[in-house]
Image: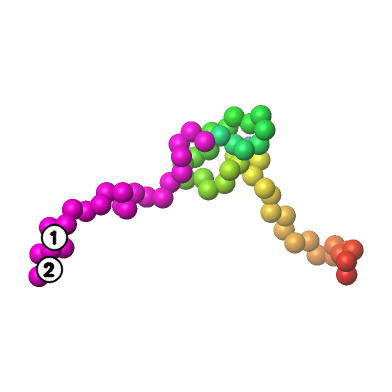
């Protein structure tokens, strides 16, 4: 019964590692930095959004 599984051809497509298009460039205007296929960001290291650490003592205007 289990021979049916062996007989089925493996699908090569489903085994590909998750990568992104090769040759993508940074989304920032004028930037021609090519992004790595493994870079999930649309920006290069220079232009990727910076996550600022939470600063203590910052006055919140809405508070
Ligand atoms: Zn860039």
Depth check, front residue: 43 or 4: 4
Q: Main secondary structure of the magenta part?
A: loop
Task: Name the residue beneath numbered marker 2.
Answer: 2
Q: Is residue 16 above or below residue 1?
A: above
Occupied quadrant, residue 54: bottom right
Disc 2 packing (10 Å; few <14; some 14–19; many ≥20): few
Report if the CB atoms under discs 2 and 1 are less than 8 Å apart.
yes
Looking at the image, which residue is at 58% across and 32% down? Answer: 33
Residue 43 rendering spot, x and y as whole percentages: 61, 41
Looking at the image, which residue is at 49% across and 40% down? Answer: 36
| Magenta span of residues | 1-24
Residue 26 rendering spot, x and y as whole percentages: 59, 36
Occupied quadrant, residue 28: top right
Q: Is residue 51 above or below residue 29?
A: below
Looking at the image, which residue is at 78% across and 61% down? Answer: 55
Cα separation between marks 2 and 1: 7 Å
Residue 17 rendering spot, x and y as whole percentages: 37, 50
Quarter of the image where the C terminus is located: bottom right
* Tag shown at residue 40: none
In the rendered view, does 44 fall on the left or right side of 7?
right
Looking at the image, which residue is at 10% across and 64% down? Answer: 3
- Is 25 inside the magenta-drawn segment? no
- Is 5 inside the magenta-drawn segment? yes
Identify the element where label 1 is drawn: helix
Depth check, front residue: 3 or 61: 3
């Amino acid at each position: 019964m289990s021979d049916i599984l062996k007989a089925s051809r493996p699908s090569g497509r489903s085994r590909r590692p998750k990568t992104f298009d090769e040759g993508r460039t940074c989304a920032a205007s004028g930037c021609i930095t090519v992004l790595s296929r493994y870079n999930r960001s649309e920006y290069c290291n220079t232009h990727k959004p910076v996550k600022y650490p939470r600063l203590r003592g910052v006055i919140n205007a809405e508070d």
